[in-house]
Every structure is written in C-alpha cells, then in structure tokens.
C-alpha cells in the first residue's frame, strides 16, 4: 500500500530490455532525479516501483525509457511521454 510521501509508478515491460530508467521531477521537464531499475531489481520484474521521500500533495512528472546492455555498452530506447501524478 502506498503511504504518505510515496507514489507508485507502473509500466509495461519491454521484451529483451535489460532494465528501465525512470526520470522524475517537480517541473514539467521531469529531469530533477533519475532512477535506474535493471532486470535484477524486484520492481522491474513486477513492472512497478514505489518512490519514497516525495513532497506530499505535490504534482510529480515522470518519464521512462528502456535500455539494453550489450557487449559492455548501453543502448537506450525513446523516452515515454511525460505523465503527471499527485503524490499521496
């Protein structure tokens, strides 16, 4: 269950990707903070993540993109459209 100061983000997994990169922020560019969820993390396998330590009752902007690690290099997909959601 999501508590005060938390927000749950869900996404559809992209086949053959190594993980997802989540960019969040309090401005519409969503570039304040970036979190990486790779295929070994629990959140990636569930297709969701709960973000902690957020300012309650504020609007948060989120964008996400997949990446693939191949032969020591990272290859990135396109950023999703920015979505907004209010923190609990």
Image (cartoon, rainbow, N blue to C red):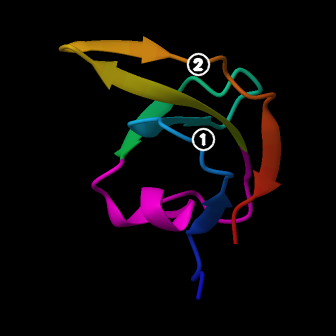
Rounded to the nearest angstrom, the CA distance separating label 1 from label 2 is 10 Å
Q: Position of residue 4 (x, y in %)?
A: 59, 78
Q: Which of 8 and 21 is in front in this view?
A: 21
Label number found at residue 44: none
Residue 52 seen in this snapshot: no
Mark in the foreground, 1 or 2: 1
Q: Do the residues labelled 1 and 2 touch (CB within 8 Å)?
A: yes
Find the magenta span and give its range.
39-60
Q: In which quarter of the image is the C terminus?
A: bottom right
Q: Nearer the viewer, residue 59 or 10?
A: 10
The residue furthest bottom is 1
Which residue shows up at 68% across the image and 51% down it?
12
Does 85 sit above or below residue 52? above
Q: Position of residue 24 (x, y in %)?
A: 58, 37
Which residue shows up at 77% across the image and 26% down it?
28
Label number found at residue 14: 1
Residue 47 within the segment the image draws in magenta: yes
Which residue shows up at 78% across the image and 31% down it?
82
Crowd tier of the residue under label 2, counting other residues whose Cα lies within 10 Å: few below 14, some 14–19, many 20 or above? some
Pointer 2 residue: 77
Q: Quadrant of the N terminus?
A: bottom right
């Amino acid at each position: 269950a999501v508590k005060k100061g938390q927000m749950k983000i869900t996404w559809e997994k992209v086949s053959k990707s190594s993980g997802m990169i989540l960019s969040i922020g309090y401005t519409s560019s969503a570039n304040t903070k970036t979190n990486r969820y790779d295929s070994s993390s629990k959140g990636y396998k569930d297709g969701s993540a709960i973000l902690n330590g957020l300012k309650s009752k504020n609007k948060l902007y989120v964008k996400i993109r997949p990446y693939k690690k191949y032969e020591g290099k990272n290859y990135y997909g396109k950023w999703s459209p920015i979505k907004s959601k209010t923190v609990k």
